[in-house]
Image (spheres, rainbow, N blue to C red):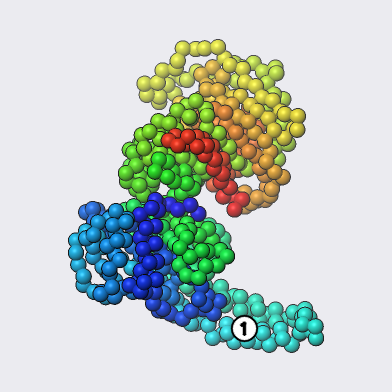
Amino acid sequence: MFAPFPEEQALKVCHNMIQELNGGSLELRQISAVSAERGDHGVMIGAAVCQDDSGRLFVLKAVSGISKEFVRCSEQRTKIESELAEAGLGFDWITEGCGNDFLKKELIEVFVPPVVLPQQVNQALSKNDGIIHELTDRIKSLKESRRRSDGSFFDQGDEEKRLCEKRLGLCNESLQAVYGLYSFNCADGKVRSLMEICESYGRLPPTGTGDCCAPKLLHYAFGNHFVVLSMAEVFFGQSAKSKISGKSYGPCDERCALILPAMLGIKIIYRDKDIVVVEKPGGLLSVPGRTEDKQDCVVSRIKRLFPNCIEQPSVHRLDMETSGLLVLAFTKEAHDGLCAQFENKFVQKKYKALLDGDLNDATGRSAPNGIGFADFDPASENPTPLSDKEAACVKNYRFPEPKECQKPWCKIFDDGKSGEMELYFRVDLTNRPKQIWDTCYGKKAVTKWKISGTNVCKMICGKKKMCTPVEFIPITGRTHQLRLASASKFGFGLPIVGDSLYCEGAQGPLMLHSSYLCFVHPVTGVRMEFESDPWWEK
């Protein structure tokens, strides 16, 4: 996964740690048994430069796994000063966690311990450990007894299958006991358990989840209310095919990508000094609402992680229920440049959705087999004027002067699986934020679409239903544009799965995802392109 914080300062710290390890002033001490498969393999070492509320600077240092820890002898600190100078952090420092009382002022070096100590893990494993080893020996014996003379094996017998199933169940039970020990301090001040974080994945996380450098560093930083200024990881030890000693690597996709978004409060797809691209989860606001209970949003979470960000970093937004890609600006220059691209329709966007049914059977006017708008009177189905009672609910609202009704249109391309529509909607003044059809006062909403795969069967409200995967390309950017293109009888007449606003009785989550975003970097001028798979395909 992409490194969530700037790496430069922390990377210098990591490289100096390697120099100290090679020079002997810093040691990696073994604190628990090494597994046979690990052997002399290398480790990841990580550093995070942080700041507390009073402005003090900290350097947090961690090693991957739970079998090793850093040790620094009090008389061996000669390279620390060069490390701090290169990182631009000054020379005043405190050392914690390495057995001495050496104290100066500005900087604190902390050797971060594992989230769960090895003795806690061993205790959790001890309940089933003996039985698992006994089963393993019996399985090996049975396997050996079915070896052919040429070295191949006869098929597994019923007894061996039963023992393997029993061992698997005990192993999973032990893993759950270990995972139950893990909880992480998060950026929002809350503590979340590993099982809570991984619940949505529907399976146990890989062994070692939570023992990488990044979650250790962030767990310590957030637990002490630090702001993370820089964080990086470097491989140390014997180089292998997948890792080169001394080279930096981002947090791993296999384990860290499962838990870091929950710890950070947002999944960071890309970040530099000017912009950040995130993957917004469904159910989270893009920008803060008016009331106190609607302040948690993408903007507030980004500003919490990056407090030097400008006050208003948002340049576009997604509906609360919609998930997917968003770009935000860290600086005014980047904000102005991105806003100009959105206003001039230079930004390319694509969305993926699952429609609640077979699109080929849909009866909406813009559906593949719909009747279109050839004989449609644009004024025929506009809403009636507001009654006095309804008008009283709309504070200080004035309709603009009446204008000529616009005629909607749609077209189906030759393949029969793609098309384009131009529809007109405005806000329902007595039922915000819902939008309603209006060719007189509504705003033009132009949408391209195509069926993006074969129909899939999904469980919806406890029932199996056939769903159509669709890709949308919004040419305009109207409120609820794609939801209306789907649900309205002037669109497909087939709502997006989970759209409780435009489909009575529907239950979320909404299966609409911003899957593609392309723009020109507002400072460097480089074309930036990002893709994201919808959560229901992962």
Query: What kind of residue is marked 1?
Result: Thr
Between 344 and 427, the one lying in front of the other is 344
Mark 1 residue element: helix
Between 244 and 230, the one lying in front of the other is 244
Residue ID at (45%, 63%) = 246
Residue ID at (64%, 36%) = 494
Q: Please determine whether, in this image, residue 125 is positioned above or below residue 517.
A: below
Between 327 and 72, the one lying in front of the other is 72
Q: Please determine whether, in this image, residue 13 is positioned above or below residue 70.
A: above
Q: Along the horizontal axis of the image, is 524 left or right of 411?
A: left
Between 379 and 516, the one lying in front of the other is 516
Q: Estimate the x, y position of residue 465 in percent, counting from the top left.
A: 68, 47
Q: Estimate the x, y position of residue 34 in percent, counting from the top left.
A: 48, 79
Q: Estimate the x, y position of residue 282 in percent, counting from the top left.
A: 50, 45
Q: Please determine whether, in this image, residue 298 is positioned above or below residue 169.
A: above
In which image quadrant can residue 240 be found? bottom right
Q: Estimate the x, y position of residue 350 in percent, counting from the top left.
A: 58, 37
Residue ID at (61%, 41%) = 353
Residue 415 visible at all: yes
Q: Residue beneath label 1, please?
A: 136
Residue ID at (63%, 86%) = 137
Q: Along the horizontal axis of the image, is 163 left or right of 284?
A: right
Residue 363 visible at all: no
